[in-house]
Image (cartoon, rainbow, N blue to C red):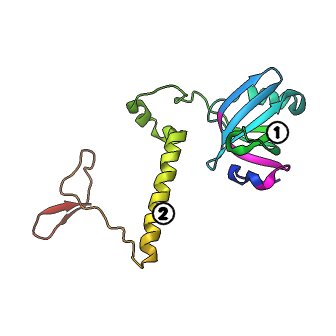
């Protein structure tokens, strides 16, 4: 069984699929557990029934932390209440890489702290949404100019002064104006 992306689930309703992704949240009550996961293309809720998945899978679910990478298998169902409109009735779970002490949890952090953990902050829903909007704007601008036969040229950036941490820049004479740095 090959893996599918979350945004492709509409064409797999009623089928058994495999999804690779990361844990967003988990919750359980008694004999049923819920996992919200993401794969970079969307969010999916997977439902685990203790009776159907067995003890090994149930114990693996109980050990999940936020941002643990995993593979979940199960049958896709259409459900308007679920994130993205689809839900996975899970029958298997494999932890690919556990996440230990994930430093950004669903609590408020200052911007200084978030910038120190920028690689993790970029995974949050808001930052992903901003990146997707930026991508669409840049794509539309480039398409606009491409359709009108413009040529995109990426030039090196010349600056008139050396910044704080840039002690090893390439210096060049900039006409009769002095040094410019790459």
Q: Residues within 10 Å of mark 1 (few under 14, many from 20)?
A: many
Residue furthest right as drawn: 51
Residue extending farthest front: 80
In the image, 63: left or right of 30? left
Q: Quadrant of residue 56?
A: top right
Q: CA distance from mark 1 to mark 2?
A: 37 Å
- Name the residue furthest bottom: 149
Q: Position of residue 105 (x, y in %)?
A: 55, 28
Give the residue drawn at x 82%, y 39%.
Answer: 89
**53 in relation to 159, above or below:** above
- Picture layout, residue 136 above or below residue 108: below
Q: Which residues are magenta?
A: 11-24
Q: Position of residue 150 (x, y in %)?
A: 39, 76
- Residue 30 in view here: yes
At horizontal 68% and vertical 45% (from top left) the residue drawn is 84
Residue 74 picture location, percent across and down: 82, 43
Q: Taking 45 as reference, is 122 left or right?
A: left
Q: Mark 1 highlights which residue?
A: 89
Total numbered labels placed on residues in the image: 2
Most common secondary structure along the magenta stretch: strand
Residue 139: give x, y in percent of width and height.
48, 63
Disc 2 crowd rating (10 Å Cα; few below 14, some 14-19, many 20+) is few
153 or 41: which is nearer to us?
Answer: 41
Between 85 and 26, the residue placed more toward the observer is 85
Return the residue found at the far left. Answer: 176
Q: Secondary structure at mark 2?
A: helix
Badge 2 is on which residue? 139
Q: Is residue 28 magenta?
A: no
């Amino acid at each position: 069984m090959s893996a599918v992306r979350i945004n492709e689930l509409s064409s797999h309703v009623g089928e058994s699929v495999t999804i690779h992704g990361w844990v967003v949240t988990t919750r359980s009550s008694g004999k049923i557990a819920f996992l919200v996961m993401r794969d970079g293309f969307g969010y999916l809720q997977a439902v685990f029934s203790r009776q159907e998945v067995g003890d090994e899978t149930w114990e693996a679910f109980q050990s999940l932390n936020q941002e643990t990478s995993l593979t979940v298998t199960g049958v896709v169902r259409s459900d308007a209440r679920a994130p993205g409109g689809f839900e996975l009735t899970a029958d298997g779970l494999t932890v690919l890489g556990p996440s230990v002490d994930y430093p950004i949890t669903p609590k408020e952090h200052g911007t200084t702290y978030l910038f120190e953990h920028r690689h993790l902050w970029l995974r949050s829903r808001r930052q992903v949404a901003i990146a997707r909007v930026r991508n669409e704007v840049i794509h539309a601008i480039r398409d606009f100019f491409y359709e009108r036969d413009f040529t995109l040229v990426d030039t090196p950036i010349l600056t008139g002064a050396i910044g704080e941490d840039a002690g090893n820049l390439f210096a060049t004479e900039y006409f009769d104006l002095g040094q410019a740095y790459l």
